[in-house]
Image (spheres, rainbow, N blue to C red):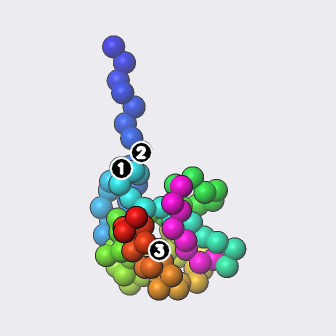
Amino acid sequence: MSEEPRPPVRTCLGCGKKQTKALLRRLVLDEKNQPLLDRSQGAPGRGAYLCGPGCLQAAVKRKAFQRAFKKNVALDVTNLEAAFLRQTND
């Protein structure tokens, strides 16, 4: 009898809560070092995860993006917030 594989677990940048990857939203950096929502959850490159729009502000306040992506990140939170709201409404 074989064990079923466990789903991958990731940590939210904002609240620090650990959840399965499927429950979190993945962010990747574009060519201008601006975080973008990765709807497909499969874009190449380093990813970072958030629970939702509420954790976005906490991540900005904690300067978690710079640590997660291991580089200086240009933050334009308005575009990211709008992307989260569009995804929630879809």
N-term-proximal mark, 1 vs 3: 1
Kindly identify the residue that appears in the image at 32 percent across and 56 percent down: 18
The quadrant of the picture occupied by the C terminus is bottom left
Q: Secondary structure at mark 1?
A: strand
**At label 2, which amino acid type do we have?**
Pro
Q: Nearer the viewer, residue 80 or 89?
A: 89
Q: Is residue 37 magenta?
A: yes
Circle 3 residue:
83
Q: Position of residue 44 (x, y in %)?
A: 64, 56
Note whether residue 13 is visible.
Answer: no
Above or below for 72 versus 19: below
Above or below for 84 versus 60: above
Q: Position of residue 74 (x, y in %)?
A: 58, 83
**At label 1, which amino acid type do we have?**
Thr
The quadrant of the picture occupied by the N terminus is top left
| Magenta extent | 33-40
N-term-proximal mark, 2 vs 1: 2
- For the residues labelled 2 and 1, the Cα–Cα distance comes to 6 Å
